[in-house]
């Protein structure tokens, strides 16, 4: 028992409370109780000695908060006490135990639990994706029995797909490989490294396309690849494997992992993309852009993340990735951020780009300067996806870590705050208090009148009175008619993105209001999504009945991301310090490291 705790993050090793001990064993035969009591006694006596590390009164310093020095503060109601937060984080841990135990008792070793019927879903190769996704959350929550059991199961896995079966590359990388790497980084268990190396090697032939962009899916039995329904590589697929493969290259010393992942980056550097408008689809054969849709939603989302986070992961050494992030985020801010007409909710949408919006007035063509109206250069759809709610967290992380001039830093920080607040409103406005999957925002008669950045510029020119557009916090809507949007997809799929951003907002601003909002959401999850053996997605977030109808599915990301971000949001200790870790797009923490000189030579890193 004790040896399995060695090497564990020293700050997360603490004396389990009696209630935690009981919950660990909930539902197991009582013969464990004497051992548990003995264990608690041993830990209680020797804990302080084994623990070492910081003294009991050690407190994590939050990273320097982003200040808005010249804005009037908003009124914030009082927040819970330190002890309340401790209890709340404990309740999240209980929720995790409830969902993992349900999976373990009813669905293991299938991929996911059907939380209503107790049946199973094998939707990701049948390798037991819930185990892989939940692994590091177990570690972080101190559930070492579940962890050890899971590692044993993983150690026996083979990863050869069945005949005619294909493993989806993107999902397998972010869920399975990401889970293995992160659990390895936290525990240093060599079995996890061995299995990550094995899986990484078996998935690698997905890059053997003409361009080097990954195919949609691969048979690890034959190395045959298959395209997705678009016939193209999505931008998210092209750029959501670099954190995993570069870290894997770092811990195995194998250049092929670095080279294949970096090839996709190279294609981005070389692509003739105007103004950072990287489209959602890329030709798998030629490696060239193949449409003109610009988005942070479903087809693109994590690609944006992996630009900033790659730069952070390798200790800010690969500056051309940072430049790419800056270029793309500038384009998002200029082209995709809008406010609604009545509530002035800041949102990010997707658009068909005809040509980018002109940047500043001095860059406008002379014909436009002389008074004529610019022709609309992009057609925004007005949809706002829950998936896009990762963006405020990313902007906040960028605002804090990038060395930007003050005027740009504040734009990134304001965008983060306004967008995170809108994500919150889409929860606060509904009958269940849970956010819909997609909404359609009300737009101005002339689309471009709703663009956020020109409104901010105008507010600045007019003397910066009050708070900037999009940050004035209108409060929850009193009725559907006052929402300024209609719900387009009514489901809540237990998704994490809003909570992810609240967590980063809390860590980067130190404002406890984000924790309170997260707590409100967690209570709604408990009320509406909890089933006897797990948690279920909701069909309709706006159903007025006491118990909203639920879908018979519990996606593995609920355990990897949603519950992890809630736990991290409520624990006072910063268990995964943001200056030491980056979280992959499935919330699997990967450590920040520096390339050694040997690696630079071996991998040809300039
Ligand atoms: C698949 O590719 C790997 C190299 O990545 C190779 O070692 C393996 O033999 C190949 N398998 C088949 C069936 O071709
Ligand atoms: C981009 O443009 C340059 C110069 O016009 C050309 O040489 C290069 O092949 C183009 N790249 C792609 C990926 O189309």
Image (cartoon, rainbow, N blue to C red):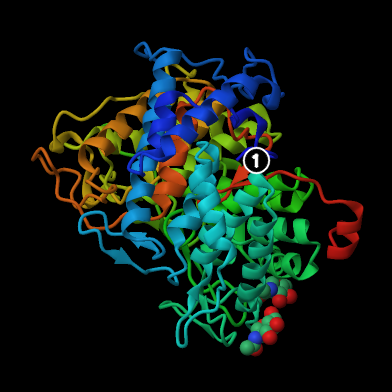
> Which percent across, then down, holds residue 309?
64, 47
Q: Is mark 1 within 8 Å of ligand 1?
A: no
Instruction: Give the side of residue 319 with respect to residue 200, left or right.
Output: right
Residue at x 19%, y 51% (from the top left corner)? 550
Report if residue 162 is visible in the image. Answer: yes
User: In terms of secondary structure, where does tag 1 sit?
Assistant: strand
Give the image quarter of residue 545.
top left
Residue at x 59%, y 22% (from the top left corner)? 65
For ligand 2, give the image quadrant: bottom right
Give the image quarter of residue 46.
top right
Seen as rendered, the residue at the extreme left is: 545
Q: Is the residue 131 above or below the residue 521 in the image?
A: below
Instruction: Give the side of residue 603 with respect to residue 175, left or right.
Output: right
Of residues 572 and 33, the one drawn nearer to the viewer in this rendering:
33
Q: In the rendered image, which quarter contains the N terminus?
A: top right
Q: In the rendered image, which quarter contains the C terminus?
A: bottom right
Of residues 532 and 266, the one drawn nearer to the viewer in this rendering:
532
> Which percent across, then down, holds residue 430?
20, 37
Label 1 crowding class (10 Å Cα cut-off): few <14, some 14-19, many 20+? some
State how many labels appear.
1
Of residues 37 and 311, the one drawn nearer to the viewer in this rendering:
37
> Which percent across, then down, holds residue 345?
33, 35
> Which percent across, then down, holds residue 555?
36, 55
Residue at x 91%, y 53% (from the top left corner)? 597
Report if residue 419 is visible in the image. Answer: no
Q: Is the residue 564 above or below the residue 179 in the image?
A: above
Q: Which residue is mark 1?
A: 581
Instruction: Give the side of residue 270 with respect to residue 381, left or right.
Output: right
Q: Is the residue 7 above or below the residue 270 in the image?
A: above
């Amino acid at each position: 028992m004790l040896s399995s705790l060695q090497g564990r993050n020293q700050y997360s090793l603490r004396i389990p409370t009696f209630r935690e001990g009981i919950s660990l064993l909930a539902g197991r035969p009582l013969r464990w109780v004497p051992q548990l009591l003995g264990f608690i006694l041993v830990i209680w006596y020797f804990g302080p000695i084994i623990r070492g590390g910081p003294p009991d009164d050690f407190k994590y310093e939050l990273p320097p908060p982003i200040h808005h020095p010249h804005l009037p503060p908003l009124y914030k109601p009082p927040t819970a006490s330190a002890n309340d937060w401790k209890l709340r984080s404990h309740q999240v841990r209980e929720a995790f135990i409830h969902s993992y135990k349900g999976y373990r008792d009813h669905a293991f070793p299938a991929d996911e639990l059907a939380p209503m019927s107790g049946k199973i879903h094998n939707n990701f190769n049948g390798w037991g994706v819930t185990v892989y996704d939940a692994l590091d959350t177990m570690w972080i929550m101190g559930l070492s029995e579940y962890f050890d059991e899971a590692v044993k199961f993983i150690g026996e896995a083979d990863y050869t797909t069945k005949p005619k079966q294909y493993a989806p590359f993107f999902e397998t990388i972010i869920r399975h490989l990401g889970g293995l790497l992160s659990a390895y980084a936290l525990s240093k268990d060599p079995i996890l490294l061995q299995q990550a190396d094995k899986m990484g090697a078996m998935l690698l032939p997905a890059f053997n396309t003409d361009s080097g962009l990954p195919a949609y899916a691969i048979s690890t039995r034959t190395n045959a690849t298959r395209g997705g329904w678009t016939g193209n590589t999505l931008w998210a697929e092209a750029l959501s494997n670099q954190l995993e493969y570069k870290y894997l290259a770092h811990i195995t010393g194998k250049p092929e992992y670095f080279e294949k992942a970096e090839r996709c980056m190279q294609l981005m550097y070389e692509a003739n993309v105007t103004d950072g408008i990287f489209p959602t689809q890329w030709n798998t054969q030629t490696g060239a852009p193949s449409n003109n849709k610009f988005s942070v939603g479903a087809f693109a989302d994590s690609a944006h993340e992996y630009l900033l986070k790659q730069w952070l992961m390798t200790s800010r050494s690969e500056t051309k990735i940072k430049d790419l992030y800056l270029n793309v985020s500038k384009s998002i801010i200029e082209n995709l951020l809008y406010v609604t007409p009545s509530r002035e909710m800041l949102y990010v949408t997707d658009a068909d780009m005809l040509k980018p919006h002109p940047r500043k007035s001095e860059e406008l063509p002379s014909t436009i300067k002389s008074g004529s109206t610019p022709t609309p250069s992009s057609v925004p759809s007005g949809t706002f996806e829950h998936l896009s709610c990762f963006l405020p967290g990313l902007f906040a992380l960028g605002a804090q870590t990038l060395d930007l001039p003050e005027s740009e830093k504040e734009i990134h920080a304001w965008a983060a705050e306004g967008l995170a607040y809108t994500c919150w409103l889409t929860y606060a406005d509904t009958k269940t208090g849970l956010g819909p999957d997609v909404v359609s925002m009300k737009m101005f008669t002339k689309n471009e009148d709703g663009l956020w950045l020109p409104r901010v510029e105008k507010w600045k020119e007019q003397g910066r009175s009050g708070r900037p557009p999009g940050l004035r916090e209108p409060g929850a809507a009193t009725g559907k008619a006052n929402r300024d949007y209609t719900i387009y997809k009514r489901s809540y799929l237990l998704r994490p993105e809003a909570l992810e951003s609240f967590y980063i907002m809390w860590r980067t601003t130190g404002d406890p209001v984000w924790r309170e909002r997260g707590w409100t959401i967690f209570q709604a999850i408990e009320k509406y999504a909890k089933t006897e053996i797990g948690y279920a997605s909701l069909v309709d977030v706006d159903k007025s009945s006491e118990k909203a109808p639920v879908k018979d599915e519990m996606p593995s990301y609920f355990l990897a991301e949603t519950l992890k971000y809630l736990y991290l949001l409520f624990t006072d200790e910063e268990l995964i310090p943001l200056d030491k870790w980056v979280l992959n797009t499935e919330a699997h923490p990967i450590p920040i490291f520096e390339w050694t000189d040997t690696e630079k030579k071996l991998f040809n890193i300039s």
